[in-house]
Amino acid sequence: MNNIVDPVYIILNVLSTLFQFLLNLIIVVASAFIYFHLNEKRNFTGTYDRINQIGNTEV
């Protein structure tokens, strides 16, 4: 009886693993954005202005 593999268990385990991976990815990206925002507010590096200038061409 121990050799029988439950397909529902496998599907739930795969979904759980994918959800954990996605959640970890979201946390890392959100942390990077929060750090970038706080760094910009504290040090005034002008990065916001440079990002706003992307695509603007002077003729």
Image (cartoon, helix red, strand yellow):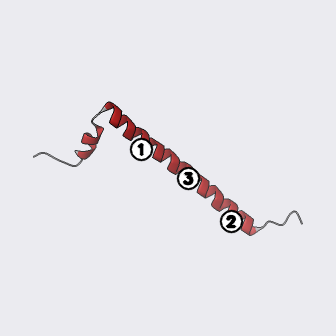
Q: Is residue 55 above or below residue 42?
A: below
> Which kind of residue does numbered mark 3 sit on?
Leu
Q: Which residue has dot 2 on it?
A: 11
Q: Which residue has dot 3 on it?
A: 23
Query: Which image quadrant is residue 58 in?
Result: top left
Q: Are marks 2 and 3 in contact (CB under 8 Å)?
A: no
Image coordinates for residue 44, horizontal then vertical, percent: 29, 33
Task: Give the mark nearest the N terminus, 3 or 1.
Answer: 3
Image coordinates for residue 6, horizontal then vertical, percent: 78, 67
Q: Are marks 3 and 1 in contact (CB under 8 Å)?
A: no
10 Å crowding of disc 2: few (<14), some (14-19), many (20+): few
Query: Which image quadrant is residue 2 in?
Result: bottom right
10 Å crowding of disc 3: few (<14), some (14-19), many (20+): few
Task: Give the mark nearest the N terminus, 2 or 3.
Answer: 2
Q: Which residue has dot 1 on it?
A: 33
Query: Seen in the image, is 42 located left or right of residue 31?
Result: left
